[in-house]
Amino acid sequence: MKKLKTGGLVVQLTLLCYTLLALFPILLILINSVKSRAAIFDDPLALPNSDTFSLIGFQKVLAKSDFLLYFGNSLSVTLISLALILLFGAMAAWALSEYKFRGNRLLALFLAIGIMVPIRLGTVSILELIVKLDLINTLTALVLVYTAQGLPLAVMILSEFIAQVPKELKEAARCDGVGEFKIFFQIILPLIRPAVATVAVFTMIPVWNDLWFPLILAPGDATKTVTLGVQQFIGQYVTDWNSVLAALSLAVIPVLIMYVIFSRQLIRGLTSGAVK
């Protein structure tokens, strides 16, 4: 028992160290976003003081761009895509894990291929399809692409967790006359919350930070995302670093909030089975 507790503690401490290491670049962006341009280049690791403190970057971002619109677009696309990925991914994982039918393994293999083959390889075909559906320069196009991109990983992770739910629990519910939908939403989903949180975090970050598909499918001013909107401050010869860092600081806030909310469930999901 002591060895199990020690092993779990080591895993959690390791994850904590990696988390702090990953947060350092974010902290560096936040520090330099409230410094003058000269102070950024003189000493990027120094904290701002009365001489170097400046909010000029935030003023430019809010005055020279529709940042709030870009922020709203990114938030809408990310949240809707995340909800669809978690819902359909969990339902598909439940079907593949619980019900045995002809083609079960082939379907699981087909979904697994989506993890191995990057979706960007099909950019041309996706663009042609979006144009034919008259969805170019719409947020719907981004939602559809990101949902398709995140489903394979969600199904793979959630399938493993659903398979660990005791069969006796499900059979007892069926004997009591509980329907399949109630079993799924009231029994299965609450039991796999760590896995859902893990999928949510790992799905949200690529969607929120993506530049490729917004640039290809929705480059219009009304549909720009935060990542695409930041690019207007980056030039070939001159880059407004104050505005870039300020925009990135504002853009990273939702990711940090979500990580804080789901951090405990995320660690439980990552360490599940690590010390068995």
Image (spheres, rainbow, N blue to C red):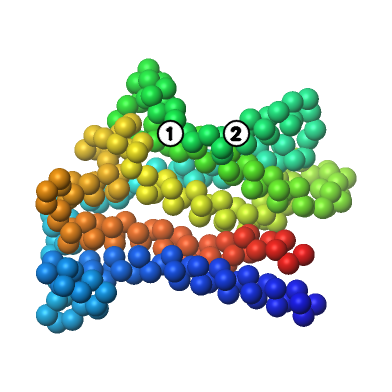
Q: Is any part of residue 69 visible from this angle?
A: no
Residue 115 percent location from the top left of the image: 56, 39
- Residue type marked 1: Arg
Location of mark 1 (residue)? 120
Instruction: Where is residue 180? Give x, y as percent.
Output: 75, 40
Query: Which residue is drawn at the image coordinates 77% and 80% (left, top)?
Result: 2
Residue 13: percent from the left, percent from the top?
A: 58, 74
Label 2 secondary element: helix
Residue 211's quadrant in the figure? top left
Identify which residue, 32 or 188, lies in the foreground.
32
Q: Residues within 10 Å of mark 1 (few under 14, many from 20)?
A: few
Q: Which residue is mark 2?
A: 113
**Residue located at (29% from left, 62% from top):** 249
Disc 2 or 1, which lies upstream in sequence? 2
The one nearer the camera, 20 or 249, is 20
Compute the Cα span from label 2 to label 1.
14 Å
Q: Secondary structure at mark 1?
A: helix
Q: Give amino acid for label 2.
A: Ile
Please name the residue shown 75% across and 40% down the image.
97
Q: Evaluate whether residue 150 shows in this view.
A: yes
Whether 31 is drawn above or below 114: the answer is: below
Numbered-mark total: 2
* Disc on res. 84: none
Q: Is residue 175 left or right of residue 63?
A: right
Give the x, y percent position of residue 21.
44, 69
